[in-house]
Amino acid sequence: MTDIKLEPLDLAALLCSRVCHDVISPVGAIVNGLEIMDLEKDEVMRADALRLVRESASRASSRLQFARIAFGAGGSAGASIDLAAAQAVARAYFEGEKSTLVWDAPRMFLPKNKVKLLLNLLLLASHAIPRGGSIRVSVEGAEAANAIAVTATGPNARIPPHSAELLGGVSMSGTIDAHAVQPYYAGLVARAAGMRASVSMDGETVKFEATTARL
């Protein structure tokens, strides 16, 4: 394994690709719905197209609001972010998804990097159960948040390829592509927050966790 060496511009490009991947589907559905409304005369079909546009617009909005905190500077004007804000964007993101979100974390303010880390671990957990299931979020250590855990349980659960190495900032080639940026970025955020991220599996449960790094 080799430490991953990535230029800041390359990391920015990969993260942009990651965000675009999340929003391109609902935005495409909006375009399709509007085209149907332009061409279709049948009122029932037009009503269905309008419903598609509304649902897809809501989906795109929820994904962008999630990305704003998980990848960007949204909500981080100060040093901390209210976990309630993270919970709100997470619930909106998972609405209509195959997986059910269980939020088992108290309402409190946490350093922004720990909140960003939590949301990124949530995304990794969703990839671990492609057929759906349950995802539970827990935070321990009161305001210090010494331990963050996101546990995904469902049929055909799996650890996403190379996640353990990428969380640690290493890969076979010393580089990454758009498919690997999610766990790599989560590891970067964990280290910026003074934590270490890891992943483990037991039966049909995959657990992503971050704990305060020991000096």
Image: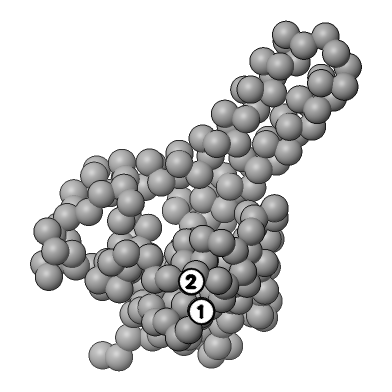
The answer to which quarter of the image holds residue 10 is top left
Quadrant placement of the N terminus = bottom left
Identified at 50% across, 44% down, the residue is 22
Q: Position of residue 111 (x, y in %)?
A: 49, 72
Position of residue 214 in the picture relative to residue 117 (left or right): left
Q: Residues within 10 Å of mark 2 (few under 14, many from 20)?
A: many
**144 or 211, which lies in front?**
211
Q: Report if the CB atoms under discs 1 and 2 are less than 8 Å apart.
A: yes
Query: Toward which corner of the image does residue 104 lie, by quadrant?
Result: bottom right
The residue shown at (76%, 25%) is 49
Q: Residue at x 51, y 35 (%)?
A: 24
According to the image, label 2 marks what residue? 157
| Whether residue 135 is situated above or below residue 23 in the rendered picture | below
Q: Position of residue 195 (x, y in %)?
A: 36, 79
Closest to the observer, 107 or 179: 179
Q: Position of residue 75 (x, y in %)?
A: 56, 56
Left or right: where 139 falls relative to 113: right
Q: From the viewer's perspective, is residue 15 above or below residue 77?
A: above
Q: Secondary structure at mark 1?
A: loop
Point out which mark residue 37 bears: none
Q: Is residue 23 visible?
A: yes
Residue 58 in picture, x, y percent from top left: 70, 41
The crowding category of the residue bearing disc 1, from other C-alpha atoms within 10 Å (few below 14, some 14 to 19, many at least 20), is some
Tell me the number on the disc at residue 204. 1
Q: How is the image coloured?
A: one colour
Q: Nearer the viewer, residue 78 or 7?
A: 7
The amino acid type found where label 1 is placed reads: Glu
